[in-house]
Image (tube, rainbow, N blue to C red):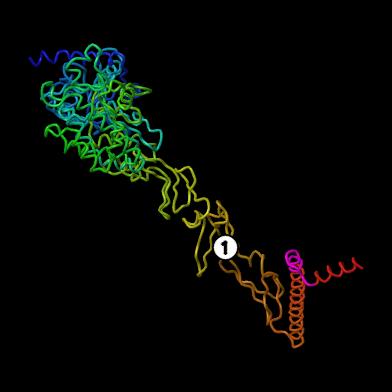
């Protein structure tokens, strides 16, 4: 009886899905498979990234191709461990057919392979190897940790022919460095999910991901490193079934937005429309939190709601949701306004937008399954696991802009630790041009203590600009001897090195000038010259004193008449100065008095003015 009741609804949803699928666009995400040797096979080919396992986004894997002598389709346990003669990693090549793609990768992983290439057996475009339908027999899928890729028939045949022709190893590099776009310093990603917690393994997988990734997500978003948007897939009810009992129980807004019944039983438990309404609420939680500058609160709400308001505990309800909203200090009224009237026979702005963005655009395909993760407009392929997803997000940052969480030892290898990455370094100042990135390293002259260094980053870097002399003396010559310090660096010059006075050289090496030997100083009559480091000493005969600026000697002691003339001269100078000061002060005082009188006369009556005015008036009457 139950099967009879569900048939119309299942048919309606199937029809809605078929319409969407026929016009949909599925994008095959790819990596590069580069043959390094032998020479006759060298070159780059494409591989399609599998939708299981863990692709090494942003990285590479170099290994040796191994094709098994038996069980070439990889559908059975190999009962052996594959190894290469050169001790390189094994990339196992297996044939398509006879079993699930994921099972081939699982058996290869158990046989010691670091990666798997599945060769096509027909001539066709590359396709994405997906996970099999959920069942007890496919639980191994969650344990696949190696990457897998699908390659064309032509490439597969080339590899097999080369292996038959020669015993020389085929060295291949699988490259994911450009599989994830990395245009700038911010990664934009979206997660297509569902509030339903009774849909089996898929629901458990997405909920586990939300709980485990929450810490990373909030850290990245609070730091402004990422822009995250949650999305929820909605279905619609075909017009022919809008008035059916099943459609009414699964849809809101008169069949416009629907979700499958959680228990697949329309006579008990929760209905599909309960799921649609909760999906809408969670969308509005993010929208409202975003307007408050707290967009990351969505992760708290979803995890708290799953714990406090689960279907299994019969608490999946509006009242429970509102309790969670209050605990997170979010405005209930704003969220209610955002949700609108779910019983109205018109479009809901929020859910209508979800249906529009569900359709693919640009380089992104349509979103047709749950869960789906999209990073920088590319659909993520592989296991939905916290660390694997973080790796993929880290691969989406422009090199040298990655946050610290992407550069931890658990996430990547610091290539600057091996021979400084081949970049320039200066051990004296502990400066290096090697900058570790998620993809590897770049050689870029550093910024040290506010001072920028310039150069190619590989063979040279030099400090430039103000303050450069404080960092390794700007790369210029400097030395200390006999308590004296001399430097070829000057902060008054933004770059370059120049030996100080008393030294010759290019500024990077400076040598003391022997002024006595070169006869450039202390050339006065009767002078004796002695060279010193950075200068010279010059002495005069008798009681004469050496004047360095004039390179001459003068008498040390003067006669009484000489002293008299000196005192007289000094007295005259002082007297002239005092007289000038007194004259200046008198003239300034007189000038100021006259100016003040002129100003005051414009605003205040003065007795003299009154006398003059009265005199004029008396003369006029006479």
- Looking at the image, the residue that sits furthest to the right is 622
User: Which quarter of the figure is the N terminus placed in?
Assistant: top left
Above-or-below relation of 506 to 91: below
Is residue 173 among what the camera can see? no
Give the magenta range.
596-607
Q: Mark 1 sits on what residue?
A: 512
Residue 497's x, y, as percent?
55, 54
Within the magenta stretch, is there residue 87? no
Count numbered badges in the picture. 1
325 up-or-down from 111: above or below:
below
Q: Residue furthest front?
A: 621
Circle 1 residues within 10 Å: few <14, some 14–19, many ≥20: some
Residue lying at the far bottom of the rendered structure:
560
* Residue 604 part of the magenta-drawn span: yes
- Secondary element under disc 1, as helix, strand or loop, is strand
**Which quarter of the picture shows residue 603?**
bottom right
Which percent across, then down, holds residue 280?
26, 29
Note whether 504 is above or below 332 in the view shown. Answer: below
Q: Which of the two residues, 596 or 160, is positioned nearer the viewer here? A: 596
Nearer the observer, 448 or 597: 597
Q: Nearer the viewer, residue 600 or 84?
A: 600
* Residue extending furthest toward the top: 240
**Residue 173 placed where, x, y %?**
31, 29
In the image, is 502 to the left or to the right of 561?
A: left
């Amino acid at each position: 009886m139950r099967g009879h009741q569900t048939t119309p609804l299942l048919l309606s949803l199937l029809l809605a899905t078929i319409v969407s699928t026929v016009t949909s666009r599925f994008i095959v995400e790819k990596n590069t498979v580069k043959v390094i040797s032998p020479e006759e096979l060298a070159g780059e080919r494409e591989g399609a990234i599998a939708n299981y396992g863990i692709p090494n986004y942003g990285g590479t894997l170099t290994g040796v191709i191994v094709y098994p002598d038996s069980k070439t389709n990889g559908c059975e346990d190999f009962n052996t461990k594959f190894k290469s003669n050169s001790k390189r990693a094994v990339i196992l090549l297996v044939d398509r057919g006879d079993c699930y793609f994921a099972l081939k990768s699982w058996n290869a992983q158990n046989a010691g392979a670091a990666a798997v290439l599945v060769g096509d057996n027909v001539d066709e475009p590359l396709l994405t190897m997906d996970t099999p339908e959920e069942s007890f027999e496919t639980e191994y899928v969650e344990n696949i940790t190696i990457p897998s890729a699908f390659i064309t028939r032509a490439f597969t045949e080339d590899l097999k022919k080369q292996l038959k022709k020669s015993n020389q190893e085929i060295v291949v590099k699988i490259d994911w460095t450009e599989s994830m776009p990395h245009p700038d310093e911010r990664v934009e990603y979206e997660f297509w999910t569902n509030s339903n917690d009774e849909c089996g393994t898929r629901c458990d997988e997405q909920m586990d991901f939300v709980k485990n990734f929450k810490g990373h997500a909030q850290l990245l978003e609070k730091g402004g490193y990422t822009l995250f948007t949650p999305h929820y897939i909605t279905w619609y009810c075909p017009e022919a079934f809008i008035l059916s009992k099943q459609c009414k129980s699964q849809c809101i807004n008169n069949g416009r937005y629907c979700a499958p019944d959680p228990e697949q039983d329309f006579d008990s438990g929760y209905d599909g429309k309960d799921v649609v309404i909760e999906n809408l609420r969670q969308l509005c939680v993010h929208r409202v939190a975003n307007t408050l500058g707290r967009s990351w609160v969505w992760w708290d709400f979803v995890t708290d709601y799953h714990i406090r308001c689960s279907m299994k505990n019969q608490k999946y309800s509006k009242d429970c949701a509102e309790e969670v909203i209050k605990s997170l200090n979010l405005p209930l009224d704003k969220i209610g306004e955002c949700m609108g009237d779910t019983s109205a026979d018109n479009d809901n702005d929020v859910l209508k937008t979800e249906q529009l963005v569900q359709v693919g655009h640009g380089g992104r395909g349509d979103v047709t399954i749950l869960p789906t993760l999209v990073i920088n407009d590319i659909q993520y392929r592989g296991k939905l696991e916290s660390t694997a997803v973080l790796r993929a997000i880290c691969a989406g940052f422009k090199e040298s802009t990655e946050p610290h969480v992407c550069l931890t030892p658990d996430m990547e290898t610091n290539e600057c630790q091996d021979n400084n990455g081949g970049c320039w370094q200066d051990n004296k100042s502990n400066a290096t041009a090697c900058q570790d990135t998620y993809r590897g390293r770049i050689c870029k002259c550093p910024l040290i203590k506010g001072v920028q260094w310039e150069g190619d980053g590989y063979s040279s870097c030099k400090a430039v600009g103000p303050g450069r002399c404080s960092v390794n003396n700007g790369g210029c010559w400097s030395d200390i001897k006999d308590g004296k310090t001399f430097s070829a660096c000057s902060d008054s010059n933004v770059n370059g090195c120049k030996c100080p006075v008393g030294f010759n050289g290019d500024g990077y090496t400076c040598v003391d000038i022997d002024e006595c030997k070169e006869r450039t100083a202390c050339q006065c009559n009767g002078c004796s010259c002695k060279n010193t480091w950075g200068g010279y000493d010059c002495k005069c005969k008798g009681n004469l004193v050496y004047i360095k600026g004039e390179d001459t000697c003068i008498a040390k002691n003067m006669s009484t008449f000489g002293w008299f003339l000196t005192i007289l001269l000094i007295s005259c100078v002082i007297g002239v100065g005092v007289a000038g000061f007194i004259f200046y002060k008198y003239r300034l005082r007189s000038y100021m008095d006259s100016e003040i009188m002129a100003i005051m006369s414009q605003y205040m009556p003065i007795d003299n003015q009154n006398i003059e005015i009265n005199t004029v008036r008396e003369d006029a009457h006479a």
